[in-house]
Image (spheres, rainbow, N blue to C red):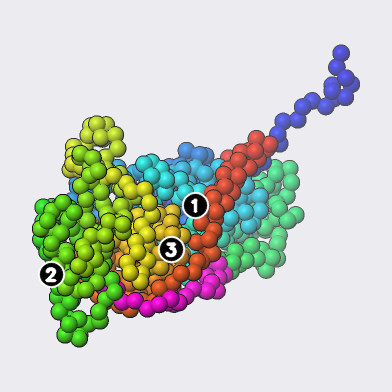
């Protein structure tokens, strides 16, 4: 027999909570595309960094309160609009298929971001300040995943890398690229919070003359935060009846906060120069006879270009028109002929080192260790003694499908272009700490500059000067400038002077505060010499290492879990 109370108190299902209406799809879809274009324009070579938060805000608004599939679709639109043109340099000499596949893969991560944005909408609707924080956390979580998967990830296009001229760049000294990304996305979240409240306020005001006594349904559909169907809007009043100042306060406050976040970057102290001993460093950009994949067929000519340019520098030093360098840096692939096995190549490099009377950091392709294997290396070549095998760095993060082919048999079914990579590059196992007399270098090669841990390991290993050896002969000036933006962030992140040495450009020096000096042109032969001050200290970002990213990504996961719990407790009614 049932208890008397049970007969009168049946189980109460979760009460319905209105999620409110999302933006009309005919508005949201173009908005998602514009979001991708805005993000694209924030990156070099365009450099319109304020558009990055705008792009973040547009995607957040488009995906808000939508079903997961719709949110994913909108995120994918943003991803295609961003990555297809951003990575267009990948199709210059390899055909369209690698470019299309890479762009679609990267867009897939923004699809996940769009779905996650939709998923956490109930949390964003619970409080005015929740939405900006959630936006920042989800972007960091998305980038943490994209930077590592698949095959070690591809961090190109991180929000942080669009801020090389922004006050937010200085935040890299506190928490590295993840903190800069968080700040950019947080700013975008504040902008969308302000804009959404403004839209809701105007929508409510337009309804007021025709309906001076709005119903709960009217308030629910326009209110900027989630509203219980049986309760008034948060704050205890409707938007329509509020005084003008009170009505617009939720718009003004987030907008002011967005400006404050960006301005706060200016308060972060960064050094304009190192505090250690002065050294003189030369970058040799020898150029190649022809841009494109067949630069490998020009191996001897490329090596000769760098040798001859170095010998010309030595003549200028002897004439007193140029300073004597303590170190000369050649770019990646400056000797694609293994100088350790080819006596002619080794003799030419020795000729350059003996003439300039300074060690040369040579970017070389070394055969082995096994058959069909090669190594992408930076090796210190000293005057008189030649190659210093104790100061050799092997690239730790070869590029999949460009320097090695994972799942080659499967990949060949997609495109026979994979066989252009005849030998697989073998990764190194130790950080690129190279000791060149009075200078301890942190050597990273080409795309490795995009990976946080690869650069950080050189600094914690004692590097005083960051060196990025790169070969842009198969790409274009846009890719080179995007890479230089990453070097600028690394210099600020670790408080180190830095340089980028390219076969064809852009090469240049970067101060610890991110300023670029002596930048070269593209597809030119140039030599630049500069006196730098080394630095041994560690920034907060260097000391914290990966903890800021772990904490922010962990909070993103917690937000996703929290949204799931909220959805179970309250039956959310989608718009």
Q: Mark 2 points at which residue?
A: 308
Q: Where is residue 462 in the image (x, y as percent from the top left)?
A: 43, 63
Furthest toward the front, the residue is 385
Calculate the distance from the C-alpha at mark 2 to the C-alpha at mark 1. Answer: 47 Å
Where is 564 relative to 175, above or below?
Answer: above
Q: Which quadrant of the figure has residue 511?
A: bottom left
Q: Which quadrant of the figure has residue 316?
A: bottom left
Disc ID at residue 462: 3
Residue at point 45%, 77% (across, down): 275
Where is 79 relative to 45, above or below?
Answer: above
Is residue 282 in sight in this rendering?
A: yes
Where is 169 relative to 228, above or below?
Answer: below
Residue at point 52%, 39% (across, down): 67
Calculate the distance from the C-alpha at mark 3 to the C-alpha at mark 2. Answer: 32 Å
Q: Is residue 147 magenta?
A: no
Nearer to us of marks 3 and 2 is 3
Give the SS element for disc 2: helix
Nearer to us of marks 1 and 3 is 3
Disc ID at residue 139: 1
Give the SS element for disc 3: loop
- Between 89 and 439, the residue placed more toward the observer is 439
- Between 493 and 415, the residue placed more toward the observer is 493
Q: Where is residue 15 in the image (x, y as percent from the top left)?
A: 71, 36
Estimate how packed mark 2 is, as few (under 14), some (14 to 19) or many (20 or more) residues with alpha carbons within 10 Å. some
Residue at point 65%, 48% (across, down): 226
Question: Which of pointers 1 and 3 lies earlier in the amino acid sequence?
Answer: 1
């Amino acid at each position: 027999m049932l208890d008397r109370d049970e007969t009168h108190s049946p189980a109460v299902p979760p009460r319905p909570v209105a999620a409110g209406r999302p933006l009309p799809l005919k508005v949201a879809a173009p908005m998602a595309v514009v979001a991708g274009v805005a993000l694209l324009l924030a990156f070099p070579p365009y450099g319109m960094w304020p558009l990055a938060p705008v792009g973040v805000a547009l995607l957040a608004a488009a995906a808000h309160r939508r079903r997961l599939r719709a949110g994913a679709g909108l995120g994918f639109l943003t991803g295609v609009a961003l990555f297809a043109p951003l990575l267009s340099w990948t199709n210059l000499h390899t055909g369209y298929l690698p470019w299309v596949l890479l762009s679609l893969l990267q867009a897939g991560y923004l699809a996940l971001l769009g779905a996650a944005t939709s998923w956490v909408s109930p949390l964003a609707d619970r409080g005015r300040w929740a939405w900006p924080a959630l936006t920042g956390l989800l972007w960091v979580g998305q980038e943490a995943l994209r930077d590592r998967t698949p095959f070690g990830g591809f961090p190109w296009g991180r929000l942080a890398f669009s801020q090389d001229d922004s006050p937010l760049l200085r935040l890299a000294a506190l928490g590295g690229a993840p903190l800069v990304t968080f700040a950019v996305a947080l700013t975008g979240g504040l902008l969308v919070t302000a804009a959404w409240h403004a839209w809701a306020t105007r929508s409510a005001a337009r309804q007021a003359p025709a309906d001076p006594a709005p119903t709960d349904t009217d308030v629910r559909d326009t209110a900027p935060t989630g509203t219980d169907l049986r309760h008034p809007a948060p704050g205890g009043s409707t938007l329509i009846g509020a005084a003008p100042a009170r009505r617009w306060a939720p718009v003004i406050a987030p907008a002011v906060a967005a400006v404050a976040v960006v301005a706060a970057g200016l308060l972060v102290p960064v050094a304009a120069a190192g505090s250690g001993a002065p050294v003189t460093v030369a970058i040799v950009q020898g150029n190649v006879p022809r841009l494109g994949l067949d630069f490998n067929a020009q191996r001897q000519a490329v090596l000769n270009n760098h040798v001859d340019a170095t010998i010309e520098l030595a003549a200028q030093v002897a004439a007193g028109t140029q300073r004597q360098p303590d170190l000369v840096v050649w770019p990646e692939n400056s000797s694609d002929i293994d100088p350790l096995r080819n006596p002619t190549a080794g003799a030419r490099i020795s000729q350059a080192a003996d003439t300039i009377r300074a060690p040369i950091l040579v970017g070389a392709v070394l055969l082995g260790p096994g058959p069909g294997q090669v190594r992408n290396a930076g090796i210190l070549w000293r005057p008189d003694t030649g190659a210093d095998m104790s100061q050799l760095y092997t690239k730790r993060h070869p590029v999949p499908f460009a320097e090695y082919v994972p799942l080659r048999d499967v990949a060949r079914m997609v495109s026979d272009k994979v066989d252009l990579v005849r030998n697989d590059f073998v990764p190194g196992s130790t950080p690129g700490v190279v000791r060149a007399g009075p200078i301890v270098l942190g050597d990273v090669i080409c795309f490795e500059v995009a990976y946080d841990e690869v650069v950080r390991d050189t600094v914690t290993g004692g590097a005083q000067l960051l060196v990025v050896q790169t070969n842009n002969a198969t790409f274009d000036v846009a890719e080179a400038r995007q890479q230089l933006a990453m070097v600028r962030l690394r210099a600020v992140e670790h408080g180190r002077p830095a340089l980028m040495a390219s076969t064809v450009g852009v090469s240049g020096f970067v101060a610890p505060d991110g300023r670029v000096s002596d930048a070269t042109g593209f597809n030119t032969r140039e030599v630049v010499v500069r006196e730098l001050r080394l630095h041994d200290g560690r920034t907060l970002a260097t000391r914290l290492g990966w903890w800021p990213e772990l904490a922010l990504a962990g909070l993103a996961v917690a937000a996703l879990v929290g949204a799931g719990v909220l959805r179970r407790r309250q039956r959310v009614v989608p718009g």
